[in-house]
Image (cartoon, rainbow, N blue to C red):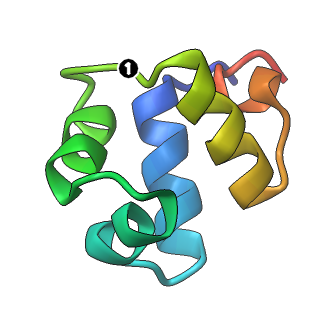
Amino acid sequence: MNDSFATILKDLRVERGLSQTQLANDLSVSKGIISMWENGKRGPTLFYLIKLADYFNVSIDYLAGRA
């Protein structure tokens, strides 16, 4: 199944029991940025895509819905 980045990010966050605020704090971004990513209003830069992949211990391909 090829889910969108927004859905995958939200699923990863919820599976780990994190709030948007907790994830934002851990990544040093605002809660609003996390919300925009999860709602598909914005996508992360490559820098944050790498940070997210490392944070959740998944590949960038997985985050992009390619795995």
Give x and y (percent) for residue 34.
Answer: 30, 48
Q: Kindly identify the amino acid type of the residue bearing the numbered disc 1.
A: Gly
In the image, residue 2 above or below residue 20: above
The residue furthest bottom is 17
Q: Is residue 61 left or right of residue 30?
A: right
Is 57 positioned to the left or the right of 15 in the image? right
Classify 10 Å Cα crowding around label 1: few (below 14), some (14-19), many (20 and above).
some
- Residue 20 at x, y percent in the picture: 30, 66
Q: What residue is rendered at 50% in x and 84% in y?
A: 17
Question: Toward which corner of the image does residue 24 lie, by quadrant?
Answer: bottom left
The quadrant in which residue 31 appears is bottom left
- Residue 6, position as x, y percentages in the image: 40, 33
Q: Indicate whether 7 appears above or below 60.
A: below
Nearer-the-camera pick, 59 or 30? 30
Which of 65/48 is in front? 48
Find disc 1 in the rendering and name its residue: 43
Residue drawn at x 44%, y 25% as measured from the top left: 44
State whether residue 52 is above or below residue 15. Answer: above
Going by the image, does 15 lie left or right of 37? right
Quadrant placement of the C terminus: top right
Name which residue lies at 77% across and 26% down. 60
Report helix, strand or loop for mark 1.
loop
